[in-house]
Image: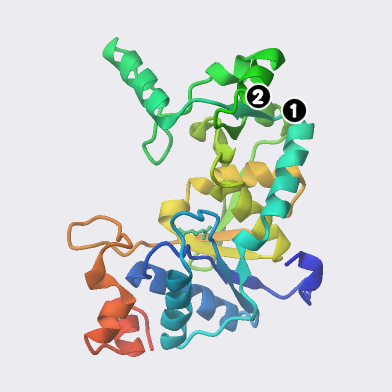
Amino acid sequence: MPAAQIATDPDRPILRFAPSPNGLLHLGHALSAILNHNMALAMNGSFLLRIEDIDLARCTPDYEDAIYRDLSWLGLSWEDPPRRQSEHFETYQEALGRLMDMGLVYPAFMTRGEVKAKVADSEASGATWPRDPDGSPLYPQDDRHLSDTERKRLIESGIRYSWRLDMDKALERVSDALTWREINDGAERLVPADPAAWGDVILSRSDAPSSYHLSVTVDDAAQGITHVVRGMDLYHATSVHRLLQELLGLPQPIYHHHRLILGTDGRKLSKSEGSTGLAALRDAGLGPLDIRGLLGLEG
Ligand code: GLU
């Protein structure tokens, strides 16, 4: 839904919960959804739902239905209709096209296996390969430097490729130091953004016409989101989103990254962890208030 279709009041806060229907929601999702919902209510704003289903291989209608069921059971309501990313691939392609026209993206041909082998080779010889904030090795820069003829030849050969942002060129386009506005306990601070830490991020995959970073940035603008409230696991990703906002001329929301709910092993919950799944807790006889209690939230 383009921003123009939402009846927005520029002063009215708009928040969103943006789950991916690739598994069942757990306590961590409940915290995020309830915080967004409560903040929207407290600010007399809107609470939107976005279904992040660009990964067509892993997202299913059943999981999407489960999201609606679990959120309704928690007592949350959102403005209909939810935005489904799979219905907006053209919008992400258009944004990618603009970055292409600016000369900031390149086709990347290395498979995951090839990247792994290259990193292993380099590390075997004692070098340290740079890693992103999530711990994944940065994409090698080889494809950045291919000639147009070579790119054309590879594309015409039919091999799979994705589109990546040339981080150095992208940063050259941004004159001022990038920051984002983070609120916590009512106080706002400016956080320095460090998109370079992510290297040449992926913007469009061979098997999905967008990436998380591109679609989330485009959608937050399209939905007029004023406050992005999400888990600390996405804190560093905000650096990339700020860069894309600057490059694409999109407004910057205010961010709040909330605490994560950890499993008994001290790690972030995953969708495969049934015992903290909302459906499992409901089946075990818990109610929405019990969930708020488990999350340390009042009433
Ligand atoms: N779809 C993302 C997730 O399920 C959240 C995206 C966001 O809040 O920015 O982790």
Name the residue nearer the viewer: 175 or 151: 151
Give the residue furthest to the left.
Answer: 265
Instruction: Tell me if 22 is positioned left or right of 192 in this view.
Output: left
Instruction: Tell me if 223 is positioned left or right of 17 in this view.
Output: right
| In the image, residue 65 above or below residue 129 | below
x%, y% of residue 160? 55, 32
Label 2 secondary element: helix
Name the amino acid type tagged 1. Gly
Provide the residue designation for mark 1: 103
From the Cβ of disc 2, is ligand 1 less than 8 Å away?
no
| In the image, residue 287 above or below residue 170 | below
In this figure, what is the number of numbered marks?
2
Q: CA distance from mark 1 to mark 2?
A: 20 Å
Residue 156 - label: 2
Residue at 70% in and 42% down: 96
Instruction: Tell me if 241 is positioned left or right of 152 in this view.
Output: left
Q: Are marks 1 and 2 in contact (CB under 8 Å)?
A: no
Name the amino acid type tagged 2. Glu
Residue at 40% in and 69% down: 29
x%, y% of residue 163? 61, 34
x%, y% of residue 157? 60, 23
| In the image, residue 175 above or below residue 30 | above
From the Cβ of disc 1, is ligand 1 less than 8 Å away?
no
Mark 1: give few (<14), some (14-19) or many (20+) Cα within 10 Å. Answer: few
Mark 2: give few (<14), some (14-19) or many (20+) Cα within 10 Å. Answer: few
Residue at 79% in and 72% down: 5
Label 1 secondary element: loop
x%, y% of residue 153? 65, 18
Name the residue nearer the viewer: 5 or 39: 5
Quadrant in the picture for the N terminus: bottom right
**Image quadrant assignment for residue 26:** bottom left
